[in-house]
Image (cartoon, rainbow, N blue to C red):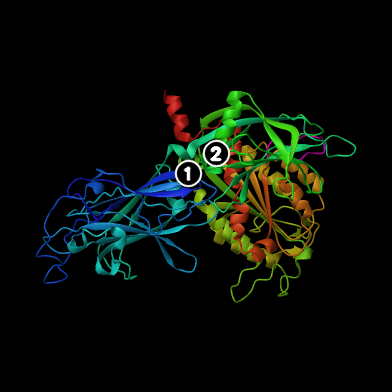
Amino acid sequence: MMAVGGGDADGWVCMMVAAGACWWWLSVVVAVNCETKRKMNTTPKGCETKRKRRGGKQAVGGAHLRPTSAADHHNVSGQNDAVDFFFKSRGLHALFTQIESDPMAVVYAKKRDGRLDEIGRTEVIMNNLNPAWIGKISIAFQFEIVQPLLFRVYDVDTKYHNIPVKMLKLEDQDFLGEASCVLSEIVTKQNRTLTLKLHNNYGLRVSRNFGILSVHAEETVASKSAVEIAFRCSYLQNVDLFSKSDPFLRISRIVESGNSVPIYKTEVINNNLNPIWRPITLSMQQFVSKENPLIIECFDFNTSGNHVLMGFSISVISKIQKSVGDLEKLHQERTGATFMLPSTQRGHDKVLKSQLFVEKFVEQEQYSFLDYISSGFELNFMVAVDFTASNGNPRNPNSLHYIDPSGRLNSYQQAITEIGEVIQFYDSDRRFPAWGFGGKTFDGTVSHCFNLNGRAGSFEVDGVEGIMAAYASALNNVSLAGPTLFGQVINTAARIAGQSLSYDRSKYFVLLIITDGVLTDLQETKDALVRASDLPLSILIVGVGGADFTQMEILDADNGRRLESSTDRVATRDIVQFVPMREVHSGQISVVQALLEELPGQFLTYMRCRDIKPLNVQMAQTCA
C-alpha cells in the first residue's frame, strides 16, 4: 500500500484491536481547529512540487487494505473481546499558510516503563484538513490490564508520497498534534465514542487549539460467534476401586507452539460411566476457528486434585486432534469418537471401548462482554481488607500491613491499586464500598465487617485513592484481632447486589477480599457463596503472606466441582477467583491478569443464564 490517498473525499481508517479471534472496530475521528497556522518557514516544504493531486486507489477504498502495523504478524492472542480503531480528522491546521496538510496518524501503546510501542500507521490523505482514514491497524484488547494509547498526527512531505507508510521516517515529517487515552475509556462509553483534545508533545502550556480526536468502537460479527455443544460418553473405564468413576471433560486448544491451552471444563458427573453433561458454550475467542485443533480429555475427579486421566478423544479424521468442525460432523453423522489412553511410548496408545458423542451442536451469536459494557452496564467495585492479628503489628517493617515511608506499596496496597485501576473504568461514579474484617474497631468490639473509612453511616469512598486513604487511616484506628471470617463481608456485598435487582439490572458487583489467613468459617463462607451465586456478583480473593491457602482453592472451585452448601444446594455458577500473591510475584505475572481473567466470563454467564440483554437491545425490542 502506497502512502498517498485521495484528496477531497472523506474516508475511514480502522485500527483493529484483537484478542484471540475477536475483533472490534474502533473508529477514531480527529477534528482539529480550522484556524490558519502561523507560517513556520519562508519556504514551505515541497512548495515547488506540492499541489493538489489525486491517486492512491487503496486509500479511498479501491483496493483491499492490509493492516499497516509495525509488526504485521505479531501474535495478539488474549482472553477477551477486541476492538478496531477508525480515525477521522477535520479542521486540521495547515502547517503552512495557503497550503493544506497531508496528514497521517500513528498509534502507539504506552508501556509501564514509559516506552512507546508503535502499533500501526494510517495511509496519507492528501491536501485535506479534514482527513478520514480507512487503513486498518491491529491491537489486542485485554480486560485484565490498563492499556494506555497515544495517537500522533503528522503532515507528510510530498516527496515521500510514493513511499509505503511503514517506511516513512517520522522525524522527517511535521508533527500536527497528539492525544492519549486508556482503551477502557473508549469501550465503556455508551455510544462507543470518546473525544479527546489534541495537544503538542512538549508539555508546554499554550493557548493554541490543536483540535480534537474522537474514537468510536464497533464489534465485528466474528467476535460474537459461538457454538453450544452437549457431550455424552459411553462405556468409560472404571478407575475407582469401591465405586464408579466421577468423570468430567477438559477441552484444550492447541496453539502454534504445539502446546495446549485449556479453554473449558465440564461439571463432574458422580458415579457414572455413561455420563451426559449439560450443554456448554464455546466462544470464537476460545476455539479461534472451526478448523483449529482441540484436545478433549476425560478425567476421573478426585478431591485431592490429582484427577485420573480416563482417556482422550480421537477421531478418524484428526486422530488426537479434534476441531469444532469435527464435532459438528460427529453430530450430523450421529457417530462417536473413540477414546484412547496415552502411552509413554510413541505409537503405543491404547484404544479404549469408550466413546464420545455430540448430542447437540448449535451455532449462535452471543452478546459480548463489551456489548453490555458499552450499552451502559457497569462493574461496581467493592473491597474488604483483613485486619486479623496474623498480619503482624503494622508498625513493624515485617508486618504485611506496614506502610513504607519510602512509598513502596505493601501487598494490600498493591492489590487494591492494581485491581482498582482496571475496574474503575467500568464504574461511572467511582464510589466504592470499602470494609475491613477481623479488627477491633473504635468501640472496642471485634467486627467482621466494619466501614473502612470509620464512618457509621457510609461505607463508600471516592476512587482508588479513597480506598488507599481509608486503609491507611484504619491502620491507625483499628486494632488487629481475629479470627478470619468471610461470611459477614460476603453477605453484606450480596445484600447490596440483591437490592440492586429491584431498581437496576445493569449493575454487576465485584468484591475484592484481601487476606493473609486460614478461614475459621469455611462452611459458613461456602453457604454464603452458594446463595450469592444467584446474584450479579463475583468475588476476587488475593492471598498475601505465607499462609496455607488450601481452603481458598476449594472456594475457587476450579477443580470442576461446584461448591455445595450445608443443605446440599449446589452453586448456580462459579463466582470466585483466587490467587496467592506469592505465586504472582515468583512467576512475574501481574496480579491483575491472574485474578481478573475469569471475570468477563462470570459476568456473561450470569447475564446469559437470565436472558438479560444489553440495554440498547432491550430498548430496541421495547420500541418494536
Residue 604 at x, y = what percent? 57, 39
Q: Are marks 2 and 1 in contact (CB under 8 Å)?
A: yes
Question: Can residue 288 be seen at all in this image of the molecule?
Answer: yes
Residue 43 at x, y = what percent? 11, 70
Q: Which three-letter amino acid code belongs to the residue tagged 1? A: Cys
Residue with the most extreme left position: 48
Residue 360 placement, left or right of 299 = left
Give the prevailing secondary structure in the magenta stretch: loop
Residue with the most extreme right position: 242
Residue 356 placement, left or right of 50 = right
Image quarter of residue 102: bottom left
Q: Secondary structure at mark 1?
A: strand
Q: 95 or 296: which is nearer to us?
A: 296
Image quarter of residue 535: top right
Q: Relative to 333, is 115 above or below?
A: below
- The residue under the point 43% across, 28% down is 620
Instruction: Look at the image and tell me in which quarter the C terminus lies.
Output: top left
Question: Can residue 503 be seen at all in this image of the molecule?
Answer: no
Residue 474 on the magenta segment:
no
Q: Along the polypeptide, which appears first: circle 2 or circle 1?
A: 1
Q: Kindly identify which residue carries mark 2.
A: 283
Residue 527 at x, y = what percent? 77, 41
- The residue under the point 17% across, 48% down is 8
> Total marks drawn?
2
Residue 210 at x, y = what percent? 26, 60
Q: CA distance from mark 2 to mark 1?
A: 9 Å
Q: Which residues are magenta?
A: 561-573
Q: Which three-letter amino acid code belongs to the residue tagged 2? A: Ser
Residue with the most extreme front position: 347
Q: Kindly identify which residue carries mark 1.
A: 22
